[in-house]
Amino acid sequence: MITNAAGSAGPETRTVKLDVPGMDCPSCAEKIVNSVSKLDGVVTVEPQVMTGTVTIEYLPETVAVDTLIERVQAAGYDVESRDDRETERFDVPAMDCASCAGKIENALDAVAGIRERETLPTTGTVIVTYDPGQTSRTDLVATIESAGYEVEETGPETTEKDLVEESRARDVWLSPRTLKTWIGGGLLLVGLVLEFLLSGLDVTLAAFLGREFGTAELFYLAGAVISGEQILRNGYYSVRTRSLDIDLLMSLGILGAITASLVFGEALYLEAGMLAVLFSVAELMEEYAMDRARSSLRELMDLSPTTATIRRDGEETTVPVEELRVGDRAIVRPGDRIPADGTVVEGESAVNQAPITGESVPVDKTDGDEVYAGTINEEGYLEVEVTAEAEDSTLARIVELVEDAQRDKTDHEQFVDRFAGQYTPVVVTLAVLIAAVPPLLIDGSVSLGIGGQSLVFAGDWATWFKRGLALLVLSCPCALVISTPVSVVSGITSAAKNGVLIKGGKHLESVGTVKAAAFDKTGTLTHGELTVTDVVPAGGESRESVLSVAASLEARSEHPIAEAIVGAADEADVATGDVSAFESLTGKGVRADLDGETYFAGKPALFEELGLSLDTIRVASDGGVAIEDSGSHETAVAGGKTIEELQGDGKTVILVGTEDRIVGVVAVADEVRPEAKRAIERFHDLGVEHVVMLTGDNEVTARAVGETAGVDEVRAELLPEEKAETVAALDEEFGGVMMVGDGVNDAPALATATVGVAMGAAGTDTAVESADVALMGDELSKLPYLYALSGKANGVIRENIWGSIGVKALLAVGVPFGLVNVAVAVVVGDMGMSLGVTTNALRLARINPDRFE
């Protein structure tokens, strides 16, 4: 990265990414950097040779994007495309329903330069990607607020924690709207008392168009106006943004009832007031329910402390966690939460990592160990060197991923969106027909006997207007629209608090549908910590010389087996030599020159390819290797074991030698996790039909591990691409497969699976990015919990969707018969269902992982 000091003064910068495919070497990049950085207004130039892109931060008031492109072209490189889009997130806490989101979306759609926009009512967030050359953040804020929703600005000194505290300060039941609703309800109650109990006080106050206007009606009208003020205001914004939503429909209902009172000669002021009060209560209940759903996310944010004690210049000082910088030394006393990701540099303690990994037992930490923000120092004194700033911590990434998890719509959400798009216009049309047609067709009244009950179809306008009004209330699909997102947020947030990071609602849904699971062996079913169990020399070699050659060859490899061999040599103080011409033989081993001779270290199959016969090799009980004569399979050394027998013990055998002789044998082993067998049994109990272990290890060793773990099938000696092919075959056979691996070496298989699950992802960016689900710890017991949570979530989503549709349909059928009035439509069909689906979704938070251990 090159920084141009000339451009570093201005704070208002923008970023553009240019696609420059001809930039394919460091010298190409240098030419472009030199050409572009000469311009005034250029802050940074970052070329990426591997992707053929150049990212430039610049001052838009000083230099234009076209000028930047010209400078790249002047260096001799064509620019194929440019991406100077910017993305902004807006906190809009009052946006808590589908109709709110619809108004904001319609308002934003009218703004030029907006590429993408997303509204997330479950978190009160609006995300907009736009062209800064056509619009600005200020314009976007103004647009959102023009739809009737306030944007909470987040300046440089505003933190996530500040937003949490602000959201808590907004108590639903102490808001101005709540006060107006209670006043309106009180006025309705007074009017009812005057009309039915103290009728002597219900005197005529005025006459309008031949209709008397009494004291009770005055209270009804006042109640409608006061409690309906916010509804009418929202209805106005619906008209401005051309949104056919519940606010517009309720506004039309209230105004229609008042107008009809003047026209029909039968007062509907009470109905107008009831509609205003009950719908306001419904909106407040919906806001309260949504706030409960959002609180689970706030609990995640609460895990991080607001301040940290650090040591600077030999003195202790307390600073906000947002001011921590990489390299700072934080002091963490017993009982404190660790303020940032870091490395222990002094002290020893047990740290409760449950907030991040879900581990139930505190983990011992000492000098050099990693710790995470939000975890709890149980007993000892620790000093931690900060390795990531607050916004880059593991906890911050978890919160961000949970917030973003709802952005990819699930199949259920897509169905609901399609259904809701047709539902509202159809029901509104029916409401208009119900209100207008029967009075024209029915003369007098018609009685219909159903089930011993007489239902009267009167022909007066007032009756059918009320019924049309009730159907109008039922035309809003709010409960239906939020039924899936609120379930997704509840499930994903609950999982995150238990150490399972699910990166989208579609993955939450998919996990519970798979019927097959594939596990990688090393580091997944086993601990992933290989140790050398046998080092046996051949011929005149010594144990030390075999280990020295093996460690010298493996020193440049990053494979876990190589690390175990190098570690064993270090522990035994065995010297290693410098190698040259090193080559990694993918899936087989390594080759390198040592002391003028070419050596190999790898699987037995590698030496078979070299032409060496392995049938006559036996590892002796006295620590030697015997080479049998004339191909005899009889042992030449008492108590010896063949390579296959070592592998049958669950050990991985590495041969060390040259093209024409075996120097020795090194065996390593990796213990099966104690909870593996129980986890797989629980998988079967929950409905997973087939569990397969995939490994690049040999068949015999793999079968030994698979038998211990209790899997149904073992696929051994697989290369990475073969693992992916196997997963694809399982997917086709069983209609869905979960792949569980480490998230790094298994990336192709994870990507191929219906759902890819990475284990041990805490602090590992690659694992979190490569998988659909990440287990922050290494506990296999979390997998049955994940499967059960997904199954339960799918059930809750189905209950919410079909419950919402069923209740609305049942109520709608009762409207023409006079069985469902406005009050029932609001209390049951709107408020009741919105509260019901939210409460039902929150049940997902009660699923305890301990049940699956």
Image (cartoon, rainbow, N blue to C red):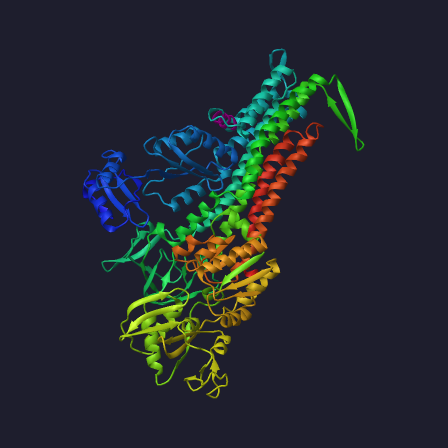
Residue at figure coordinates x 24%, y 44% from the top left: 44
Question: In the image, residue 340 lies at what x, y percent?
Answer: 35, 55
Position of residue 683 relative to residue 168, above or below, is: below
Residue 773 makes an appearance in the image: no
Position of residue 72 relative to residue 431, above or below, is: below
* Residue ranking furthest to the top: 210
Position of residue 805 relative to residue 739, above or below, is: above
Q: Nearer the viewer, residue 26 or 686?
A: 26
Q: Nearer the viewer, residue 732 or 519?
A: 732
| Residue 191 image-quadrant placement | top right
Range of magenta residues: 231-238
| Residue 767 image-quadrant placement | bottom left
Question: In the image, residue 322 lies at what x, y percent?
Answer: 33, 49
Residue at figure coordinates x 63%, y 41% from the top left: 803
Q: Nearer the viewer, residue 781 or 826?
A: 781
Q: Quadrant of the C terminus?
A: bottom right
Left or right side of 396 for 690: right
- As for residue 598 lying within the magenta part, the answer is no
Q: Nearer the viewer, residue 795 or 838?
A: 795
Left or right side of 684 for 351: left
Residue 752 makes an appearance in the image: yes
Question: In the image, residue 102 lies at what x, y percent?
Answer: 49, 32
Question: In the image, residue 436 lies at what x, y percent?
Answer: 65, 20
- Magenta span: predominant SS is helix
Left or right side of 830 for 118: left
